[in-house]
Image (tube, rainbow, N blue to C red):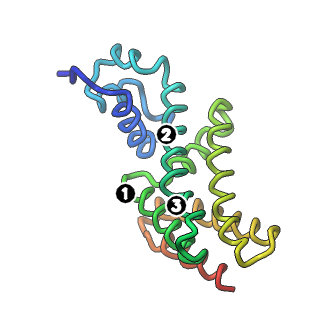
Amino acid sequence: MPVQKVTKVEVVKQALFLFKKQGYHRTSMSDLAVACGLLKGSFYHYFSSKDALMLEVLETVHQYFATRVFSIAYDETFPPRERLEKMIAKQIYVAASTEGGCLMGNMAIETALVTQEFLPKMREFFEEYLRALAHLYSSKFEPTIAQKLAEQAIVEYEGAWIMVKLTQNNQFLHDVHQHALERFDA
């Protein structure tokens, strides 16, 4: 029996979990409705389409990371290396806390070539991620090198998630964390 009262926030949260686990294209509106305890027709009361819902999910994830993860890079109460360590650890923890890995990386791989509507949101997320890492590396390196180190960290992180999914071995994530710190210490 469907739940009578579900908030838009709860719908977005359930959609996030399903999109992370199953992917965007493999998640149907029926799947989403069931996960939220709604009848399929009732789901449209909250979102006009799956695309509209995905845009809201992407925005929600971006805002969460901006305020709770990327912001760590700018917290001057800790030294830069400690901020880098905390930011990457938090990022890994958040992505690994539910099945599916990094939602933004997953969606970029799955939808970037077929759903242009999502690209701006995903680009904004990765640009902010890159700025946060480059900010930390710039405390030790000149801007061009800091930018390259930040790019390398993101590439390794997203690649690590692919390997974790293929091998079920979380060591790849621990290695990414360690490599980012080693680059900082170089």
- Give whichever of 89, 44 is nearer the camera: 89
Helix, strand or loop for disc 2: helix
Helix, strand or loop for disc 1: loop
Residue denoted by label 1? 97
Residue denoted by label 2? 60
What's the residue at 35%, 37% (across, down)? 14
Q: Are marks 1 and 2 in contact (CB under 8 Å)?
A: no
What's the residue at 43%, 57% (across, down)? 94
Which label's residue is closer to the chain start, 1 or 2? 2
Rendering coords of residue 147 (x, y %): 76, 65
Helix, strand or loop for disc 3: helix
- Give whichever of 146, 1 is nearer the camera: 146
- Give whichever of 135, 147 is nearer the camera: 135
User: Which numbered circle lies on residue 161?
Assistant: 3
Q: As drawn, which residue projects farthest toward the front?
A: 77
Which label's residue is closer to the chain start, 3 or 2? 2
Q: How many marks?
A: 3
